[in-house]
Amino acid sequence: MSMKSVLAVLVCGAFVGAVPSLSQAALARKKVGGTAPLASYSATLSSNSVIRQQQLICDPPEPLRGSTSVEYEPDKVTLSGFDYGPGYGPSILQSEEFADGFVEVVSNNEVFLQPINAFLQRPDGRETGYVQVYYSLNREQQAGQIAPFGPILDEDPGLGDPGEGVDTHQLLFNVLDTPGLGPATYHVYGDRGGRGIDPDFLEGLDDAGNSFIVPFDQIHDATVTAPEPSALALAGLASLGLLRRRRLNSVLEPKRI
């Protein structure tokens, strides 16, 4: 039986325990009429050309907890690192081994999901270009941002403006020597559960302090692409202002106190 079949019983449950104090950038239930999407992922892609590594920072509006899927191109890059943003850590609902997320791999013609930390230590197969990360906000810490470690190559703010949201986690990718394939593209989105263990989601608070879930099909996606090598110098100049990126407002209506 594949890892995906064995772990299919890990489903999203209700949030348990006290909820953290959230800033005005927090994910808050929209009070006015409107249509989906109700929330948005966003992404920032930077580069360290010395070690040929790209950094993908994932930053939705500040959720209590949630998950994010990323599709990438394994013929151009390989997943080489992962870390949480300030205030965030593994899912509080799953066992330690499965609390961070999974990477999709293929071995002996079988496609399955391997825990992300185990994959980074020793892959059980060839990566297919999909990773799902779970995260929870620690109520004793404050959410924040991850500093880009080099020039910003591309930024997709989703439904908001550049600088909104918080950084739940980052993924690092080593660039492969595959000339002629063009730049690498990353798609940050809510998976319906077809590739991930469970459908992606974001959890926030309404005005009464009650938690609510934004499902995968009501979360706007984001896509970023590394520019061609000849454009990196221009990208470096353009990124100087973006390096001061701060989160000012929520993509959704702020919670009223």
Image (spheres, rainbow, N blue to C red):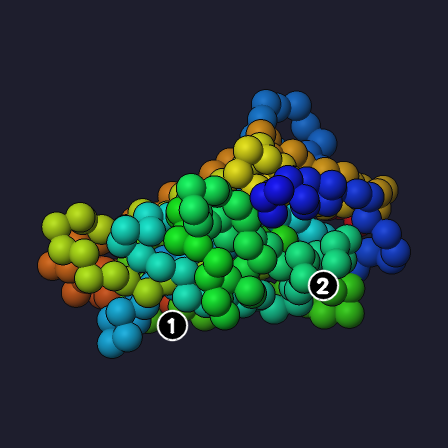
Q: Residue furthest front?
A: 108
Q: Amino acid at mark 2?
A: Glu
1 in relation to 244, above or below: above
Instruction: Count all numbered tags in the image, as a single digit.
Output: 2
In the picture, measured across the screen, residue 50 lies left or right of residue 24, that is left
Q: Where in the figure is residue 192, as x and y percent of width and height?
A: 58, 32
Frontmost residue, 115 versus 82: 115
Give the secondary structure at mark 2. helix
In the picture, measured across the screen, residue 33 lies left or right of residue 175, that is right
6 in relation to 166, above or below: above
Frontmost residue, 150 versus 134: 134
Frontmost residue, 221 versus 25: 221
Q: Amino acid at mark 1?
A: Phe
Residue 132 has which mark?
none
Q: Where in the figure is residue 254, as x and y percent of width and height?
A: 67, 45
Cα distance between the residues tagged 1 and 2:
29 Å
Q: Where in the figure is residue 158, as x and y percent of width and height?
A: 46, 42
What residue appears at the point 68 percent right and 62 percent down from the top-left corner?
97
Q: Is residue 218 visible?
A: yes
In the picture, measured across the screen, residue 247 lies left or right of residue 181, that is right
Q: The N terminus is located in which quarter?
A: top right
Which residue is label 2 attached to?
Answer: 96
What residue appears at the point 81 percent right and 48 percent down from the top-left corner?
15
Q: Which one is earlier in the sequence, the residue at label 1 or at label 2?
A: 2
In the picture, measured across the screen, residue 174 lies left or right of residue 179, that is right
